[in-house]
Amino acid sequence: MPIKTTSSYRVSTRTQRAKEGPVKSVEVKKQTPEELAEERRKKYKPNHFEERKFFTVQEDYAILNLYSKENAKKSTREIAEDLSNKIKHTQESIRDRIKRYISKLSSLDSELLKDASKVGFKTNSA
């Protein structure tokens, strides 16, 4: 006998479940946080860019240079592709950096970025 309405379907499935009896729950194995972390490491691939969540001044200046030279010829995606080989960031993060930051810099900001990128950082060695 075909089921004509959804309400009759609901009634029929409830009736079937009642006839079958209660469903037994599956026993869940309790894991320590270390075991859960190890399981997650196995399940997901490691993110090589996880440690690098920021851009340095030199990287910003390299992006600005290429963006200002190639903006008329290439799209932002192509510029990001070229830079992702030189700079250790993903194409998406470089594109986002251009869109949100680099493209909105004034000429004064560009000059300040250029000057700041030339400054070398010295480590304190005893």
Image: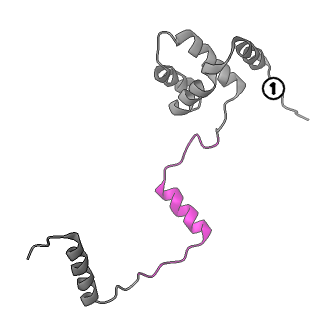
Q: Where is residue 74 in the image (x, y as percent from the top left)?
A: 47, 14
- Provide the residue span drawn in magenta: 26-51
Q: Position of residue 49 (x, y in %)?
A: 58, 40
The type of colouring in the image is: one colour
Q: In this view, does 28 lie above or below 65?
A: below
Q: Is residue 2 above or below residue 79?
A: below
Please name the residue shown 56% across and 9% down the image.
69
101 displayed left or right of 45: right
- Please tell me whether residue 30 belongs to the stretch shown in magenta: yes
| Outermost residue toward the left in this view | 1
Between 90 and 8, the one nearer to me in the picture: 8
Q: Where is residue 94 in the image (x, y as percent from the top left)?
A: 56, 28
Q: Mark 1 points at which residue?
A: 121
Question: Amino acid type of disc 1?
Answer: Phe
- Please tell me whether residue 81 belongs to the stretch shown in magenta: no
Quarter of the figure that contains the N terminus:
bottom left
